[in-house]
Amino acid sequence: MQKFILLLIVLFYSSCSFFGGPDYDSAADSTGLSFDGIDDYIQIDANVLPDSGDFSIAVWGKADSKQTGNRIVLSQNDTTGSPFYFGSAKESGTAGFIRMGDDWEKVHDHSFPVDDNWHYYTIVNDGTIGDSAEIIDTSAFYLDGKMIQSVMGQGKNYPTAEPFYIGTQWDGSGEYFSGMMDGIAVWDVKLSPEEISILYNDGDGLDPTADTLDYQSSSHLIGFWPFNEGLDSTVADYSGNDYDGAIYGATWTRIESKLGDTADTLDQDVADKEEIPEQDEPKQVLWGKIFNQKEKPLSKARVTLYGYREGDQDEYYFETTVRTTRAGDYELHDYRPWDTLAVSLAGYKPMVMTIAELDVTDLPLDFYLNKAKPRRNKIKSDEETAAMARLALKNYEMIQGLISNARPREVITIPTGIHIVSKPIVVENDTNITIQGEIATGIVLNDLNKPVLIINKSENIVFHDLRLGHSEAPRGICDAEVVVVDDSRRIYINSCEISGSGTIGVKVTDSDGIAVVSSFVHDNSWFAFSFRNCKNVRIENSRIIENKDLIFKRSSDVAMFSNTIQK
């Protein structure tokens, strides 16, 4: 009987709360808040934004076109110098451009709409930067459900000081927002493009507290303020985390719809202008279906676009990936110049093609994947696979054991032959060792998602006569670098071959005294070299051939002498 009563209590409280918070009835929500641009704002006395990892922010806003000067939508301070703020700067007339945290410089060139219409702003912060095994660390900004800019290795604001402000700047400088706001939400995950599109819901909005279709992140809400009270001087947090806020000056207003006027009531010239993308960033859209050869739609297939902004050495190759729905549908939106498209699904042969090979103006663009050929003599093939896996593990343990047991000033010689390994070879906290090969000594990693060789916190390390790369894979399939160096000093790579469809041949961060001499760096699908925050880098007497591009560098001193370079 006691267990039954306890169950009833649990069910009662579950029915009255959403993750411990109040129930949200979207059908009954007909209010928002109006901000006068002079002194109105909301203050939440908590560190709402996470101080690490992924997070996403979404807000509905209707900016007043009559306001002059800068305006802030959201902000939060940081004691270590990485505050978060999002808003706009006045440019001329009714135009403005986006202002966001210092790490979001690439989004600043885009317009912030101040047209007295509702817009849905979504910020996706990727927390994978610093993980050398994961090159894909893309943050992104979305407007009305469509991505307008992504930033690789940027957008990493992690404010740690409270409070969290809505409608003003965190530092007391003002920059108040003029207009209306509604439905602000924060998640502790990266929302997918599909989820953002569904939440936008063609301008009608969607309840983020309940999973719907491709939106499956309601359990990751860490703050949600629907502004549905219609009275009182506070706004309630419906995530269950009790991040309630105090209203200072902002007034309640009724919102019938965010869809705005119908097309026949709009001035046609204005409507036409709003539909035209920016001329310097033409919008590109790709959509269609993925089928098998029997014309059955394939769900969860990956559709990936790769590209690079030519002439901009301060930007990595970018990547945009979506997965098909249960009906086999995919849709990609991007403002950047694409180079390569890849379609893949486990059990099927991947398709990799350049955009030049496709007619992206003739949509929908459907693709048909072929099943991977069944292996002959399955029992024998399974035995061979198991034997190769055992050999790869044995090779890894042999090479890693030699390095891990090395003493300072020791020369390690790896036996001749191509050694397929199952894990990255790691040199960590080592000093004064030489790792060399004999004739035709190679290390090949069979995991396309991890670097072949990682050097971390080491000093005076020499690599000589080694071939390093991944197992062969079509371009765009390998997701990792070949050699990664981090926080190290005086690393000397001599007479080595570095290739194998790696995204980057040699990637170095926060290091000093790096030399690549008399080496052969080729066929890497992004850059031959990448340097960030590095000093005294020297690349000399090397052949650098058929890489997608030569070098990415940021805050680095790189000198190149007597190299043979062919793109």
Image (cartoon, rainbow, N blue to C red):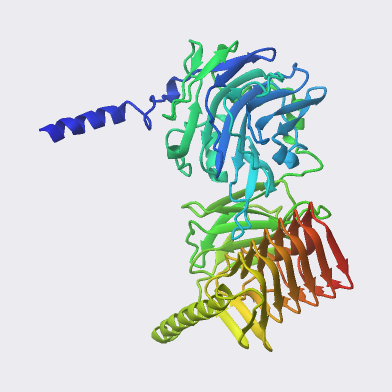
Residue at 69%, 21% (x, y): give it: 116
Question: Could you say which is closer to the camera, residue 501 or residue 343?
Answer: 501
Residue at 75%, 36% (x, y): give it: 108
Furthest residue toward right = 562
Question: Could you say which is closer to the camera, residue 35 or residue 496?
Answer: 496
Q: Position of residue 318 (x, y in %)?
A: 69, 54
Is any part of residue 358 visible from this angle? no
Picture layout, residue 473 above or below residue 168: below
Q: Position of residue 458 (x, y in %)?
A: 65, 64
Picture layout, residue 485 above or below residue 40: below
Picture layout, residue 498 above or below residue 116: below
Q: Quadrant of the C terminus?
A: bottom right
Picture layout, residue 462 above or below residue 189: below
Is any part of residue 401 visible from this angle? yes
Quarter holding residue 218: top left
Q: Quadrant of the N terminus?
A: top left
Question: Could you say which is closer to the camera, residue 75 or residue 556?
Answer: 556
**Side (left or right) of 45 relative to 477:** left
**Side (left or right) of 320 relative to 384:** right
Q: Position of residue 228 (x, y in %)?
A: 48, 19
Residue at 43%, 20% (x, y): give it: 28
**Side (left or right) of 478 relative to 217:** right
